[in-house]
Each structure stands twice: as structure tokens, then as C-alpha cells.
Image: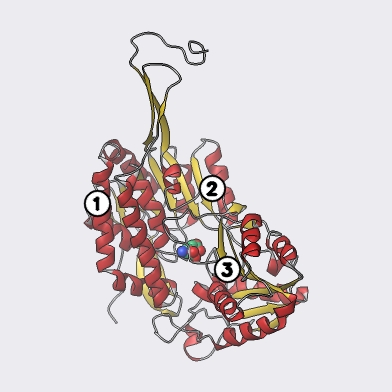
Amino acid sequence: MAPPRIYKNFIDGEWVDSLCGQTFENLNPANRDDLVGIFPKSGPDDIDRAVNAAREAYKSWRLVPAPKRGEILFRAARLLQERKETLAQQMTREMGKVLEEARGDVQEAIDMTFYMAGEGRRQFGQTTPSELPNKFCMTVRSPIGVAALITPWNFPMAIPAWKCMPALICGNTVVLKPAEDTPLSAYNLVQVLEEAGIPRGVVNLVCGFGPEVGAPLVRHPDVRLVSFTGSGEVGRDVAAACASSFKHTCLEMGGKNVIIVMDDANLDLAVDGAVWGGFGTTGQRCTAASRVVVHKKVYKEFAEVLVAHAEALRVGDGLDPATQMGPLINEAQLATVDRYVQIGKDEGAKLLCGGKRLTGGLYDRGSFYAPTVFGDCDPRMRIAQEEIFGPVVSLIPCDDLDHAIEIGNSVIYGLSSAIYTQDVSKAFRAMRDMETGIFYVNASTIGAETHLPFGGMKQTGNGHREAATAALDFYSEWKSVYVDFSGKLQRAQIDNA
Ligand code: UN1
């Protein structure tokens, strides 16, 4: 085997080691003997360098015409397209998701990059009449400054792209801190931006861990924007750290998403949706369908078919085309899943399948868990309330649509929800009443597209949205411009009264 490759940070247009010279290993979760690469274990000094570079670069980047910034993004999107297969393979190796899904992750980055490149020629403001004669009113979007972007491991390229591309097209500069489990995909994305011609200092990559890299980054006085995707626990710290200096903060955190299955649903379709939503990405999506609320008339049948499908899933190395579900990201995540399975049993939920670590052969080298379904869950159980972030689905019987909606909304989160029904009235009622930022009819809770706003209500987020033009509202500030060409003093609210 070739010696592992040593990767670097990207600061001020140079690929550099961390100042302290320390490193950490990026391991393949399907095979811990496979060392994907060695990455710089950075610290506060590296953050200082990166933020300084971003602050200096901002002076000129903010003045580059947005369509020109868009041209760089278009080039980056094309490079991502050309490299899609290699990027996806590298992603599966560091993150574990099956290759088909890794391709989807890269595709999501491509889509976002093209989309935001196009925004270089839009970023429309408004013109509107003034209340006074000979006066002109308009709004323009202004960039803000240095954006700190902290990204999770479950979408190692898509989420860095969701954050970088709108930040850049609006004229901000960026310091990206990717999750320590998946730095390679972020590295690959930054390398593509470099090759596409991003000027030095505009994008900086600093690898490492939360306490030594994330914490000083969000506290840095020259950082003006913070976008974070991760756990609610860390999100709370990020919000608190940003509050004292009123940094703009976009938080994307947990989910306990629900699929509602009505008695008139196409059950085969609903099972397909529950399998994809519950076990896709090994349940490690904020949009995962970790709860399925099923009408009591079809509950038994639905549960049987779902369990049969879950048991038939082929779990293994995501690089093997036969694999349908990959490993968990690491041993800590596996321990969390195992702990919740025990909690579910102790709470009296019925374990219908799975509920254990997979062992033997290839399984002994990675963090593999059996697709798990709990039946007859009470909606108040912890397994039906808390985000597990693993392949665990809780089935909850319900009496009717009102009951299903009440159960669906009975959690602190509000990211995504779905209903399977043939009845358009039920679909619209659920659409209106579900307290989630994303809602699906006859489709699973996952599958957000890049040109629609992404984000959640309640404790999933803090009211912002990623993706779509909604992202521009976070990465820019409105400037209202008044031009008075009357040649005299005109007083709003007074001279026209
Ligand atoms: C996430 O789970 O963190 O809709 C993001 C989806 C994907 C994005 C998920 N397009 O599931």
C-alpha cells in the first residue's frame, strides 16, 4: 500500500501545515485499517492567519463584479462535474455512505455551485416609488465580510458548497472548518475553487477539531457571519459565542422527522419512502425519517412489510455496488445508536428488527449496525423524541389525521415531514399544520433540491434558510438607497403629510 497522503490547510492562497505541526488521521469507517489521509490538526493561531487573510482579501473581493465572481463559480461547477466520480469515491471512503449517495452529494454541490454562479447576474433588489417628488428609492444587496463556515460530516461536500457558494457570490470571504471525520471532501472542494481561479485569501480551509478550531473561529472579532450545521448542543454554544458581538448566525441543527401514513396510502410507496428516509445515509441525515406514524387500520401490514425490507437491506462497504447501507461514521456514533436502542427497549418499545452491531468478517473492521425498527412506540418515548442519527426507525400507531399531526408536531424539532395519502384534502391539511420547514406529499422526508429554501422551524434552526435565494438573505445585507434629485430639502413623513 502506498504511504498515506498528507494534506494541508489552505490559507491566503497557499497550502500550508498547521503552525503547531500536529496532524490527525482520517479513517475509512467501513475499514479502520484504511487510512484515507493525514490532515493538519490546527489551532487558534491558524485561525488567526486564515481570518486575517480573509479580512484582507475581502477588501478587493467585495468590489469584484458579481457576474465575474459567478464566472469563477461556473468554472468550479464544471470542474466538479468532470471529477464527480473520483470525488464521490473519495467521499465514500472517508464517510461511508454508499457510492450512489456520494455521487448525489457531489451532484448537490454541483447544483448549488451552478445555481449560485447564476445569482451573480441576479441578486435583484427592488425599486419603488418615493413618497416625495423627485426622489428615487432602491435596495441593493451588500456583502458583509468574513464568513466562518462550520460543516458536518454527513454531507461532506454538499453542505460546504451550500455555505461557500452563496457566501462567495454575495462578495464575502470565507474560512471553512470541515468536520474532522470528513476533511477530504472539503479539501477537494477548496482545491476546485482554487483551480477555478478564486483569488488568494478569498477561501481558506482550516482543518481540525471543534474546541481548537471551531471555537476560536466563531469568537474571532473579525468574523462577521457564522453558518453552522451540526448538533443542537454545539449550535447553542455557537449562538451564545456570537451573541455578545451580534455576529449574524445561521444554525442548522437536529431533526426528528416524521412520515405520516394514512389508511388510504399506497402502502408499497410508503414503505419505499420509509426505508429510504430511515436507512438512507445509514439514518445519518438531519432530514432522516426517524419516526413513522401509521394509521391503525394499516399499521400491522405496514410494519410487517417495512421490517421485511429493513431485514433484507445489504449492509456493507459503500464502495461495493451491492451495498445498500454503509457503516456509521465512527465508533462514538455507533455507541450513541446502541445506547438509544437500549433506551427504547427499557422504555417498552417493541424491537421488531435489528438493534445490534453487525459483527464477523468485514464487519469487524468498521462501524456497522443492523437496520433497526421499533414498533408500538409511544410518541413520548425518548426514541420517538430525540435525534438518534442512525438507522433506527420508531413506528407509532395513530387514530386519524389530527392525531398524526399532533404526534408529528410533538417534538422540539421542525425540519422535514411527509404524508402518504391519496386524499388531497388530507395532504393540504397536513401541509398547513405540520410545523416543519420542509414538507413532502407521497415522498419521503429527504430529497431537498438546491433551488428551494432548506431549513427547519422550532429548535432545528434559528429562523434562517440555506440554499435558494433565501441563502442570499443571510449572506448579504440590504442597503436601502434614496437619491433625492429635487435640489431642495425634502423631509420624509413631514413635507408630504
Ligand atoms: C442533511 O441531512 O444534513 O434533503 C442535509 C436531503 C439532502 C440534504 C440533507 N438533500 O436529505
Q: Taking 234 as reference, is 100 left or right?
A: left
Query: Badge 3: how crowded within 10 Å, few (<14), some, or many (20+)?
Result: many
Residue 476 marker: none
Task: Give the residue type at disc 1.
Answer: Ile
Mark 3 vs 1, N-terminal side:
1
Q: Nearer the viewer, mark 1 or mark 2?
A: 1
Task: Give the residue type at disc 2.
Answer: Val
Instruction: Report which residue position mark 2 lands on.
Output: 238
Identify the secondary structure beneath mark 2: helix
Identify the secondary structure beneath mark 3: loop
Instruction: Report which residue position mark 3 lands on.
Output: 389
Question: Residue 122, can we see it?
Answer: yes
Task: Give the residue type at disc 3.
Answer: Phe
Place residue 3 in its image quadrant. Answer: bottom left
Mark 3 vs 2, N-terminal side:
2
Residue 24: image x %, image y %?
Answer: 40, 65
